[in-house]
Image (cartoon, rainbow, N blue to C red):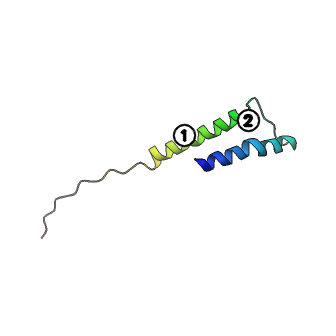
Amino acid sequence: MLLNAIVDTFFVYPFQRAMSRAKLFREGTFKEYHLLGIFLLKAALMYVYQHMVVEKPKPQRALKNNPIE
């Protein structure tokens, strides 16, 4: 999550400003800190989804009582 925060902060602040100056894209109605909050919320939701759905623990099967022959 820390790496996501670092990369998202880099994208939102210096990268976005450089692209705006180069007139490749411009910021819409969101302020920079709103965009950073959206990115971090998206990352947190993806981590929760991964933990709850993708990597959910598998239930252990009951051991069969087979007599040893």
Q: Which of 59 and 13 is in front in this view?
A: 13
Q: Name the residue under label 1.
A: 45
User: Which corner quadrant of the image does residue 68 belong to?
Assistant: bottom left
Q: Nearer the viewer, residue 47 or 33?
A: 33
In the image, farthest residue toward the right: 22
Q: Where is residue 1 in the image (x, y as percent from the top left)?
A: 57, 47
The Cα atoms of the two marked residues, 2 and 1, are separated by 20 Å
Q: Is mark 2 on a helix, strand or loop?
A: helix
Q: In this view, does 53 lie to the left or right of 19?
A: left
Circles 2 and 1, Cβ within 8 Å, touching? The answer is: no
Q: In this view, does 46 lie above or below 62?
A: above
Determine crowd level at label 2: few under 14, some 14-19, many 20+ residues with C-alpha closer than 10 A: some
Q: What element carries label 1?
A: helix
Q: Earlier in the sequence, mark 2 or mark 1?
A: 2
Q: Is residue 38 above or below residue 63?
A: above
Q: Name the residue under label 2.
A: 32
Determine crowd level at label 1: few under 14, some 14-19, many 20+ residues with C-alpha closer than 10 A: few
**x 70%, y 34%: residue:** 33
In the image, farthest residue toward the top: 29
Q: Position of residue 46 (x, y in %)?
A: 55, 43
Q: Is residue 21 left or right of residue 47?
A: right
- Quadrant where the C terminus is found in the figure: bottom left
Q: Which mark is residue 53?
A: none
